[in-house]
Amino acid sequence: MTDPPRVAAAGAALADLERRITDLAAAGEDALAAAWAQVASDFAWNTPPGVLASPAIDDALATIGLRQVPRGPRVPRGDGPERVLHVITECAAVGGHSRMAWRWIERDEDRLPTLALTRHRAEVPAPLARALAARGGVAVPVLGHDLIDRGRALGRLVDAHDLVVLHIHPMEVAASIALADRRGRPPVLFVNHADHCFWLAPRVPDVVLSSRPAAARLCVARRGVHPDRSALLPVPAEPAAAPPRRDAARRALGLADGAVAMVAMASAYKLAAIDDIGFADLVEPALEAIPEATVLVVGPDDDGPWAEARVRTGGRLRALGRLDDPSGVLAAADLFLDAYPCSSLTAALEAAALGIPVVSYAPPRPQAATYDIDEPALAGVHVVARSREAHLSELRRLAADRAARAGLGARTAAAAAAMHDRGRWRADLEAAYGRARACAAEGSLAGPAPVADADTAHEDAFLDALHAASGLTLTPAGALLRNGDAFPCDPRRGLSVVVHCRDDADGLMRALGSAVETCADLDDVEAIVIDDASGPAAAAVIDGLRGDVRVVRNPAPLGPQASFAAALEVAGGQAALLMTSDVVLLPGWLDPLADALARPGVSGAAPAVLRGTGREVCVLTSVASARAGAAVVALSVPESAVRAAPAGAMEAVA
């Protein structure tokens, strides 16, 4: 288990960030407050701070949303199917929250869906894209040069729909801003997929939907959600339409005739030892006791301790890595072993739907009860062992008795089918929609004060250890590094052109001339020249520019990268173009870079450098994010081009 002071230190760091956000919002610095809210919530999501919600951040974002995205009375619309806006931060081909989204859309047959993607940077996963297309829906990226812009863009989408479903990440700020004003707002449902972690805005939705009772209890006890605003809706699971043939799947996996295939599916961190043992420690004794058993684990890669376990067991414990389509492994399975110490409910439900018996090790552990499967529909068929001895005994029994496995598998499939029957699930969905409408009509409703006691301290310590084992934990500086895209970055609202020069007066004049010519349409542009300890001739030229440009002089040469930081401290623009004096800007360079910088996850944009030597620097980025210390990883934008002009070149500006 972790050292409690580590959780306390994370709580103190969150409190510091909360004060910064509150102060910025009070000063009207809404875009910066929102950016720091994303940084703070990403930190708290990944590094447990001893709380699962932040009223201070939520209040600041509510104030910003009311100020920046006001909403008037709802305008009645004409006939046609109800329109549902599904808001997703990011989605993947694997994982429970992605499955929930695409199966929700797939089963919600009478409504027209729209998918709003606030920070998704890849293709929409194929199952989600197919479900959306089958319902006549479209995917819409939510773009903007800061989180206020993105909140407004999302707000416009919200106002064009009849219902809103949030499948968002814990650090999703744009939704808090877009939905702050409840006047005329459509009913909002929140899918509680990160149920054991910190997340923003528990007061924003009208109803919070959890997939299991433990998660619903946690929402009320530790987030202050009113019990009447919490409901259950399971993640729909069903067998593949055409599952692979069992014999072919077993041959592909190299399983011998008579082998009992035990399958587990989970991310590697869910299987690592936390406060007692890890998954490998649990199953290796079973392999010793059951000679015919083989354990196949989908999720972790076959390296490090997993490779060592494979060698130790003669290849009978194998990590198969991440598989977007695990149907072949499931088709070969005789038993499904739930992950330990952190269960994988969605994977277990997928296995149950295929008629694979599910076996869990769930010892008494109040600090981690939230991480065990507690699905009531499987209560009569889910094999739960409370001790390692009982777990081994159940595996031996089921491995030895094919008829018992078959009978339990049939009952398991029936229980899963009843739980996820399309008609029943749709009835549950309609009830959730109805509840959201009723709650929206009633208005906001405060819940109980969040609980903080010895039991919650145990929970936080376990979560901290779990995230530490997974490599998820962050420092505030680490959270800042990966959230540079949250900060204001619109060059049309202010651009600082920063040119680094060392003994290249001719190049500097070409670079500045090209900036004057290509930025003529911008209202707010400034130039900053970095004199990197140039000799007397170049220094004299630079001195002659004072009054027209700002000059930052280094007493000793630092090079471009180290020099830009000092210039950014005095920059007045929202965005900065950081360039060296051997670059000439060509007409049309700005718009493609500015458009790229509005995309989610992009903290810097770089043009193509024509005839370049590789030494040139030209990057457009956010001044505020660079000042704060966020990483600038430039996205290459071939639609934008500049030209290299090495020292001594005498070409005119294009």
Image: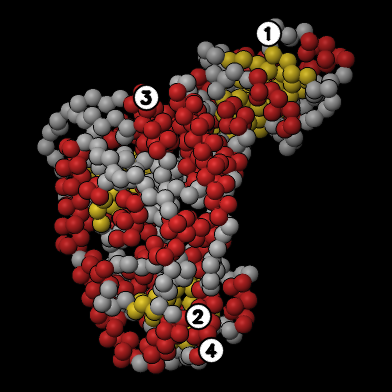
The CA span between labels 4 and 2 is 9 Å
What residue is rendered at 33% in x and 60% in y? Answer: 214
Name the residue carrying label 1.
Answer: 548
Q: Quadrant of the C terminus?
A: top right
> What amino acid type should be assigned to the residue bearing mark 3?
Gln
Q: Quote the CA–CA distance across marks 4 and 1.
A: 79 Å
* Residue type highlighted by circle 4: Glu
Mark 3 element type: helix
Q: Using the image as rendered, state which of residue 560 and residue 648 is in the foreground.
A: 560
Q: Amino acid at mark 2?
A: Val
For label 3, the residue is 68
Residue reaching furthest to the right: 536
Q: Which mark is residue 288?
A: 4
Q: Position of residue 253 (x, y in %)?
A: 48, 80
Mark 4 or mark 1: which comes first in sequence? 4
Q: Residues within 10 Å of mark 2 (few under 14, many from 20)?
A: many
Q: Residue at x 42, y 84 (%)?
A: 390
The kind of secondary structure element at disc 2 is helix
Q: Tell me if I can see residue 224 in this picture.
A: yes
The outermost residue toward the left is 79
- Sequence-earlier tag: 1 or 2: 2
